[in-house]
Amino acid sequence: MSRTFTIRLTPDQANWLATTARKTGVAQSRLVRDQIDRARITAKQGFLRHLGTVSGPRNLSTRKGFSPK
């Protein structure tokens, strides 16, 4: 690793990190790096992260009053 980064965690965050590390057997630092990588990937996807979250007809032209004639 080429850089050290120090952060302050809330008690809830620290408890989650310690518990997750203990349960999974993965180092706390590895968990933090994984979450940063996950956030980077999500940021690159932009609006695609919302894909599949909107409900309604697949084709808006099937809505009543908007059908092609």
Image (spheres, rainbow, N blue to C red):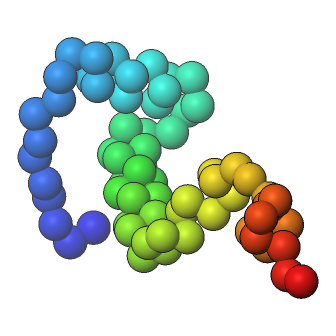
Where is residue 48 drawn, in percent x and y? 55, 70
Q: Is residue 8 found left or right of 31 in the rendered image? A: left
Residue 41 seen in the current view:
no
Residue found 64% across the figure and 53% down from its top: 54
Q: Is residue 57 above or below residue 23?
A: below
Q: Is residue 45 above or below residue 49?
A: below
Number of marks: 0
Residue found 45% across the figure and 19% down from its top: 19
Q: Toward the viewer: 30 or 62? A: 62
Residue 31 seen in the current view:
yes
Q: Is residue 48 above or below residue 56?
A: below
Q: Toward the viewer: 24 or 69? A: 69
Dividing the picture into quarters, in which one does residue 18 lie?
Answer: top left
Q: Toward the viewer: 66 or 9? A: 66
Q: Is residue 63 found left or right of 10 in the rendered image? A: right
Dividing the picture into quarters, in which one does residue 66 lie?
Answer: bottom right
Where is residue 8 drawn, in percent x and y? 10, 34
Residue found 89% across the figure and 83% down from its top: 69
Where is residue 59 drawn, in percent x and y? 80, 71
Dividing the picture into quarters, in which one does residue 61 lie?
Answer: bottom right
Q: Toward the viewer: 15 or 69? A: 69
Residue found 70% across the figure and 50% down from its top: 55
Q: Image quadrant for the N terminus?
A: bottom left
Q: Is residue 16 found left or right of 52 in the rendered image? A: left
Q: Is residue 11 above or below residue 46?
A: above
